[in-house]
Image: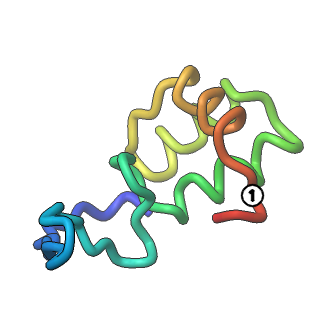
Amino acid sequence: MADIYDLPIKRVMCKSCGLTFAVLPDFIKKFCRYGKDVIRYVLTAVIKKTFEEVAEEICLDYEMDIAVRTLCFWKSKYQLSLL
């Protein structure tokens, strides 16, 4: 979960309207710097634990520093079934 990768993101242009779009891999959530597996883990963990406990667990186990506020935001924005 804590691996860091540099991924080239392919951009394509619509021939009819001229807008460009990024083609993202399945494991990336649009406009999010964390992968779907991290968000999915958090949403599953906060069912049984507090946001603070989950943030501390991620920090200790995976050496990722995620703010409690970010976890709260994910809980309000994302549904586990849609990830």
Quarter of image, res 52:
top right
Percent across and percent down for residue 46 are: 78, 40
Question: Going 48% across and 25% down the picture, which residue do you hit?
Answer: 67
Of helix, strand and loop, which one carries label 1? Answer: helix
Vertical comparison of 20 with 73: above or below: below
Percent across and percent down for residue 7 are: 16, 71
Vertical comparison of 77 with 18: above or below: above
Quarter of image, res 41:
bottom right
Vertical comparison of 57 with 8: above or below: above
Q: Nearer the viewer, residue 3 or 31?
A: 31
Vertical comparison of 69 with 47: above or below: above
Q: Nearer the viewer, residue 67 or 11?
A: 11
Left or right placement of residue 76 versus residue 16 in this view: right
Left or right placement of residue 63 versus residue 75 in this view: left
Question: Going 51% across and 62% down the picture, which residue do you hit?
Answer: 36
Mark 1 crowd level (few <14, some 14–19, many ≥20, 10 Å Cα): some
Report the number of numbered marks: 1
Give the residue pinned by disc 1.
Answer: 80
Question: Going 15% across and 75% down the picture, which residue do you hit?
Answer: 12
Give the quadrant of the N terminus: bottom left
Q: Nearer the viewer, residue 78 or 58?
A: 78
Question: Going 13% across and 73% down the picture, which residue do you hit?
Answer: 13
- Specify the farthest residue to the right: 48
Q: Nearer the viewer, residue 2 or 8?
A: 8
Left or right placement of residue 57 versus residue 63 in this view: right
Kind of residue indicated by mark 1: Leu
Percent across and percent down for residue 43 are: 72, 48
